[in-house]
Amino acid sequence: MRRLFAVLAALLGTACGTGIHEPTGPCGEDAHVGPTPQQLAFVSDALYGQYDICLINMDGTAVAQLTTSLGNDFWPTWSPDGTKIAFVTDRDGNNEIYVMNADGTNVRRLTTNAAADEQPAWSPDGGKIAFVSTRSGNTDVWVMDSTGANPAPLTNDAAVDVLPVWSPDSTRIAFQSNRSGDFAIFVMNADGSGITQLTDAAVADGAPAWSPDGTRIAFESDGNVWVLLLDGSRPVQVTKSRFALDFLPRWRP
């Protein structure tokens, strides 16, 4: 169920449109733009209904399947230099985080735990990967070296802490949590200290996204997109949809 939630969240995130023409076949969902803007990594179920990670040019040409395991491979996340892709797979029986070269070679396992490890997020400086794990009995945000070494919990709460995203300078992490009621946006230092709640929990707030200059965070709230400052002040409603859902905002670099 937890893997299904992760996949559905990613698929829904692209439903708002990327402006990319989808090639023939079941391709185009869960797209993640890499540092080189001419290519996208994405997830496809074209092979017998299982999820695999593929690569495609922005013009819809040169589709390449990067993973070929018998398990489901999803949630691709580019390294900042564009040479590697971290991803989640259940090929070993439960969700773990792996990494591979951008051409699909040199696949390596980063996490080894009986619990689920998901939602990898590469730090902009390339040294760390934040992720979500249930290994402590809760759904918490963890961090490890980009080699998989030194995994450590950043949050330790009975609530659900998910969707970690790094600040552009790699010093802070925003995430969403329901520790104060409904889901709200929180920010903490990269070592897990200084956890601060930015939005109230009156309605569900989620999917935080840092502005490129690191001064603001966009997020989804009650079917609309909002932006606020890092201290939680000056919230601004960006979209004002009455009969549609606006969600998963992403800043233009």
Image (cartoon, helix red, strand yellow):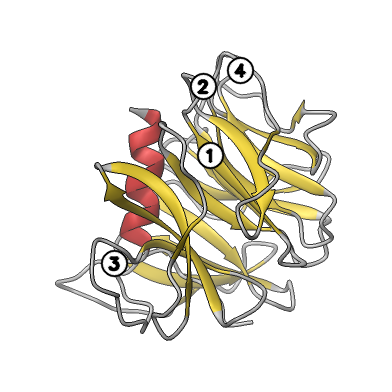
> Residue at the spot x=63%, y=16% of the render?
136
Quadrant placement of the C terminus: bottom right
Residue where numbered disc 3 is placed: 15
Question: How far apart are labels 4 and 2 at the CA level?
Answer: 16 Å
- Kindly state the secondary structure of the residue where label 1 is placed: strand
Residue where numbered disc 4 is placed: 135
Picture quadrant of residue 12: bottom left
Look at discs 4 and 2 and give the one toward the viewer.
Answer: 2
Question: How far apart are labels 4 and 3 at the CA level?
Answer: 31 Å
Q: Amino acid at mark 4?
A: Arg
Look at discs 3 and 2 and give the one toward the viewer.
Answer: 2
Residue where numbered disc 1 is placed: 88
Q: Nearer the viewer, residue 58 or 190?
A: 58
Picture quadrant of residue 192: top right
Q: Is residue 95 above or below residue 224?
A: above
- Say which label, 4 or 3, has the lower sequence index: 3
Look at discs 1 and 4 and give the one toward the viewer.
Answer: 1
Question: How far apart are labels 1 and 4 at the CA level?
Answer: 15 Å
Q: Residue 92 has which mark?
A: 2
* Image marks 3 and 2: residues in contact by CB distance under 8 Å: no
Question: How far apart are labels 1 and 3 at the CA level?
Answer: 21 Å
Q: Amino acid at mark 1?
A: Val
- Say which label, 3 or 2, has the lower sequence index: 3
